[in-house]
Amino acid sequence: ISTITNDIVIASGANTVDIWSASGNTLVLTGVISGAGNWRHSQGAGPTILGGSSPNTYSGVVTISANGYILAAKNGAFGTTANGMVATGGGSVGFTGNVNYTDLEPISISGGGQGNNGALVNFSGTNSFDGPITLASSAAIGAISGQLTLNGDISGAFNLTNRGAGVIILN
């Protein structure tokens, strides 16, 4: 496990920042992530966990487009609700560590996610998410372990599959 406690600024501009963790490793970011730039997780199968005590304030789009996870370990981990999260092409966005995620962060999902565990995934713990979820194509939601309660609207005229040994609750 590698932990970075420093604050991170993702500057806006023509380039997209690529932050990821290699297979077999875990990257934990506990500082505040700010800025208006776009961020992608386009390689590496290890989880990147957004933790710490203060919400992140970045407003760019985050795209998880390869095998890997970006996981919220706090409310507000995914930044402002301005642009949302996109999980596609084997990437997963999810939750770990008993998070009650009340920010209405939009999440767009497609495909089966990392290891076919779900493009939206509960990695561990009992977590809830209140934001809207859009199915950009057929997708899977999974709980590797624990429980994930989804309180927001789910939209999109595609198939949705449940995966994993844990529990998914749709409210």
Image (tube, helix red, strand yellow):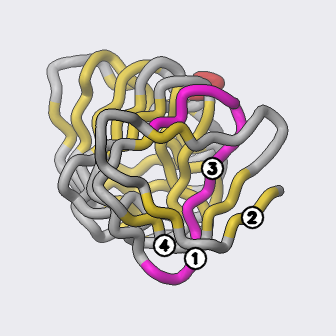
For residue 68, say whether it is visible: yes
What is the residue that sits farthest to the bottom in this orientation? 53
Which numbered tag is attached to residue 140? none
Q: Residues within 10 Å of mark 4 (few under 14, many from 20)?
A: many
Residue of label 1? 52
Residue 134 drawn at (x, y percent) = 22, 35
Q: Which residues are magenta?
A: 40-54
Q: Please name whichever residue, 19 or 97, is drawn nearer the observer in this view of the structure.
A: 19
Relative to 18, say whether 101 is above or below: below
Separation of residues labelled 3 and 2 (CA atoms): 10 Å
Q: Residues within 10 Å of mark 2 (few under 14, many from 20)?
A: some
Instruction: Identify the secondary structure beneath mark 1.
Output: loop
| Residue drawn at 63 percent across, 49 percent down | 48
Q: Quadrant of the C terminus?
A: bottom left
Separation of residues labelled 1 and 3 (CA atoms): 13 Å
Q: Residues within 10 Å of mark 3 (few under 14, many from 20)?
A: many
Q: Mark 1 vs mark 2: give the one in front.
A: 2
Q: Please name whichever residue, 75 or 58, is drawn nearer the observer in this view of the structure.
A: 58
Q: Residues within 10 Å of mark 1 (few under 14, many from 20)?
A: some
Relative to 108, say whether 107 is above or below: below
Q: Is residue 43 left or right of residue 15?
A: right
For residue 151, say whether it is visible: no
Which numbered tag is attached to residue 3? 2
Tag 3: amino acid: Thr
Residue of label 4? 32
Which numbered tag is attached to residue 48? 3
Determine whether label 4 and label 1 are within 8 Å by CB: yes
Q: Mark 4 vs mark 1: give the one in front.
A: 4
